[in-house]
Amino acid sequence: MQPDPSQRASRRPKRAGLIAIILAAVLLLGGAAVAAALLLGGTTDPDPDPTQKPSPSPSAETPEPPAAPKATHVIAMGDMLPHDSVNENAQQPGGGYDYAPFFAGIRTQLDAADVTFCNQEVPSAGVEFGVSGYPTFNAPTEFARDLRGAAGCDLVNLATNHNADKGTEGIAATRAAWDALSPAIVSGANRSADEQGAVSVLEQDGKTFALVSFAEFSNAPVDRVSMNFMDDDALVQKLMTQAREKADVVIVSAHWGTEDSHEVNDAQRAFAAKLAGLGADVVVGTGPHVLQPVTWLDRVDGGKTLVWYSIGNMLSTQLELDQRTGIIAGFDVTTDADGRVQIENPTAIPTYMHYEWTAEQEAAGDLAARHKLSLTPLADSADLLGQARFGVTAEDQYAATASILGPDVTVLER
């Protein structure tokens, strides 16, 4: 029996309604899934590609750690002692003086430094005071100029037994010569009480460096304002306190000790301990004209003070091999994660001061005949030492130098 057409017509809307209900349910369920995915941080992709890695959100990338602060490499050179023969070899035919060539043989080592300490043993008051060597020294102003320009001296000690050789006027003229060579920091010999009481600071690589200088004695009479002395307890306390407050790194120059002795004496040990107690980071000793040991001293604040009891001569024409063997003392200044400054990695590059001088000239005591002056890393001095009268190889002297300095320093060849 055929269905009534009216019945077929009446069934069609019911089927359409059912379809609509199904579609609505599907859409409702789909919307719920999307909402759940959004709420739960999921994805609406029903079939993600398992081989494809999701791209990380830029905000989820791991930030790179900040770069470690740069280590600052500091070097120290000992007595710059212009004897008559040094000045004569520096004198130029057209007038004036040039000391720069003497440093050519250690150019690589000088250029590797970020901060350089130098001990200017004598006044550089200029030709007006008379250029002279031992025993009453005075150098032309070009000596200071070339220590600054050729040797790169940034921190300069003037507290020595010779810097009053031309009196307070010579000290004033020497300071005036250095005034024109800023930003070098000069310490130890003064034109006034105000100058003596002021600690200057050098900035390098975001770190600040103070130099405080003291001498054990003076060959020439001088007042206690014009020269800083080790036994001036009030001055030592004042300058060390100020330096510690102003600078990250406090370097103390101590011109002390027994001349021509590799042994550290009791006065040196006592003053080094005092400086460590006042917060010195590094003590650089000069004055004996030969090398002495290196050590670390414990401080009450938990830190350590690096003490170079004597770094010997650098530029001179003294006679004996030990007087002509110096070091380029080095150390690194770093900053730890808490921002504390650390002194690390003490090193020493032994140097040899050479000049030509025949046996006949030496026998005759012809000191002015010394010529062709040069500074060389000791490790590179085999041929030069072979020309000298010492009968010692570069290897022998290198080993002797390492033995004197001791185990707390790494002795390098160059």
Image (cartoon, grey):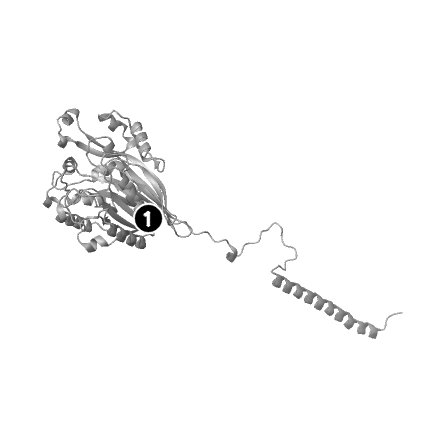
Q: Which residue is mark 1?
A: 277
x, y percent for residue 208? 31, 52
Q: Residue at x 19, y 54 (%)?
A: 193
Is the N terminus in the top left, top right, bottom left or bottom right quadrant?
bottom right
Q: Residues within 10 Å of mark 1 (few under 14, many from 20)?
A: some
Nearer to the camera, 55 or 350:
350
Nearer to the camera, 273 or 188:
273
In the picture, measured across the screen, residue 407 lies left or right of residue 326, that is: right
Quadrant position of residue 14: bottom right
Q: Is residue 71 visible?
A: no
Q: Is residue 43 above or below residue 108?
A: below
In the picture, measured across the screen, residue 31 lies left or right of residue 286, that is: right
Callout count? 1
Nearer to the camera, 206 or 16:
206
Is the C terminus in the top left, top right, bottom left or bottom right quadrant?
top left
x, y percent for residue 206? 34, 52
Q: Is residue 96 above or below residue 67?
A: above
x, y percent for residue 328? 29, 38
x, y percent for residue 306? 33, 43
Q: Residue furthest right?
A: 1
Nearer to the camera, 137 or 68:
137
Identify the element where label 1 is drawn.
helix
Q: Is residue 222 visible?
A: yes
Q: Is residue 16 above or below residue 65?
A: below
Residue type highlighted by circle 1: Gly
Quadrant position of residue 367: top left
In the picture, measured across the screen, residue 10 lies left or right of residue 371, that is: right
Q: Is residue 242 above or below residue 27?
A: above
